[in-house]
Image (cartoon, grey):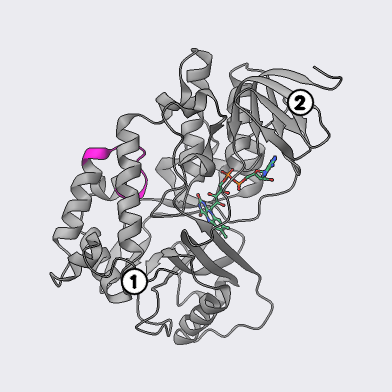
Amino acid sequence: MSTGDVEVDVCVVGLGPTGRGLAARCLARGLSVAAVDPHPDRPWVPTYSCWVDELPDWLPPSVIASRVAAPTVWTTIEHRIERPYAVMSKTELWKALPTAGARVVAQKAAQVGAHRVEVADGTAITAAVVFDCRGLPPVGTRPAASAHGIFIAAERVADYVAPDEALLLDWRNENDAAPDAPPSFLYSVPIGDGTVIFEETTLGIPGGLTQRELRRRLIARLRTHGIELDGSEHSESCHYPLDQPPPRRHGHKREPIPFGSRGGMMHPCTGYSVADSLALADTAVEAIVAGEDAVKQLWTPSARAVYWMRMRGLTGMGRLTTEQTVAMFDSFFTASPRGQRALLSAHDDAVALGAVLFNTVAHTWPFRWRFDLVGWTNRKRWAV
Ligand SMILES: Cc1cc2nc3c(=O)[nH]c(=O)nc-3n(C[C@H](O)[C@H](O)[C@H](O)COP(=O)(O)OP(=O)(O)OC[C@H]3O[C@@H](n4cnc5c(N)ncnc54)[C@H](O)[C@@H]3O)c2cc1C
């Protein structure tokens, strides 16, 4: 060991919401923690949302900035999803995940090993367990979540998205997308600061869509509802891969444990990872305290089966036309609440997920579109 080196129970590399959550839960359990991030105090940029029931009990209610009791999905008809949905307050979430007591190293990790992390200035941290929470690698041609979001004052859009309402998936044909172009939908929710986010989003298309095209589609949608931008609106963009796999079964003995979006917790079909990762933090912490294998506890056979099935869903979704996607969602949203939950959020309900995927395919009309859905035809429709 050289001067400045540190020895701890747990080293967390990356202090996004996932890493910070994990560090906070390790500290709450009495473990000694080091955390490495080049910008540990930089506020998080994206707007994080989730289903309210996904949030772990240990988070205070203040982390919810905006709550919608029953968000809406538009396919060929309107569906009300009787399941509360929330946008999180980033400042309150930050406060709820304290890292006081951790040795925070404000540097980039240069080498991340199973038990040793070397930072940019050459010093090292030795830990019984290293969690790699560095987020996602670049997209390239991988199936992507791409979105362009514009924040608009709630009173200007009240006729489109009323207060206390949200459009979770709006597939109405209002975005001027060409019929032979990859599909995208509108996501719109009040974020709790007096604005509503309108986000044109595409999920599963290899390489995603450009910000320019998504913005063009979004402006077309807003115009359909009589809303013109005046240039004062802030925007956000997103572009990240959806297929980041869980850790290998035995690899973690020689490698750090990837956790959060980096470790298979990015949902392949929704692009969400924050609530699930926070909910799983205690599983990892308890495994460490008990001297058990954290990867085995996090990634049970059932959880791995769920991930595998969601990946099939992702590749299916990523080859459909807009019309086919709408038909597929029409079928999916007739599923029972448990079936919907199994796809949208549950970490390891493999039985319900298998059933809902089978039924979604079986009830998609016209019949021939099922061949695209399962990949017998038009397998690489949007491949780049
Ligand atoms: C516009 C937008 C909207 C989104 N909406 C949602 C949503 O509604 N719900 C949801 O769940 N997700 C959403 N996401 C996805 C969300 O961003 C990710 O789910 C989330 O950020 C993953 O958290 P994480 O902690 O795993 O990784 P990140 O948030 O990517 O954090 C990674 C951290 O690692 C640090 N790091 C990187 N390299 C190093 C290194 N070499 N050494 C040390 N530290 C390093 C970074 O500085 C960063 O702090 C959205 C994303 C975008 C862009």
The answer to whether residue 166 shows anywhere in this view is no
Residue designated by label 2: 124
| Residue 78 on image: x %, y % | 28, 69
| Residue 314 on image: x %, y % | 35, 56
Residue designated by label 1: 381
Q: Amino acid at mark 1?
A: Arg
Mark 2 CB in 8 Å range of ligand 1? no
Name the image quarter holding the N terminus: top right
- The foreground one among 318 and 16 is 318
Residue at the spot 78% in from the left edge and 38% down from the top edge: 107
Relative side of 9 to 359, left or right = right
Asked if the stretch drawn in magenta spans residue 291, the answer is no
Per the rendering, the mark at residue 234 is: none
Residue 9, quarter of the rendered image: top right
Q: Secondary structure at mark 1?
A: loop
Q: Classify 10 Å Cα crowding around label 1: few (below 14), some (14-19), many (20 and above).
A: some
Please, is residue 261 above or below residue 229 in the view? above
Residue lying farthest to the right in this orientation: 3
| Residue 302 on image: x %, y % | 30, 33
Residue at the spot 69% in from the left edge and 29% down from the top edge: 117
Asked if the stretch drawn in magenta spans residue 344, the answer is yes
Residue at the spot 18% in from the left edge and 47% down from the top edge: 355
| Residue 133 on image: x %, y % | 59, 38
- Magenta extent: 343-351
Residue lying farthest to the top in this orientation: 290
Q: Amino acid at mark 2?
A: Ala
Q: Secondary structure at mark 2?
A: strand
Residue at the spot 27% in from the left edge and 70% down from the top edge: 378
The answer to whether residue 328 shows anywhere in this view is yes
3D distance between C-alphas at marks 1 and 2: 47 Å
Name the image quarter holding the C terminus: bottom left
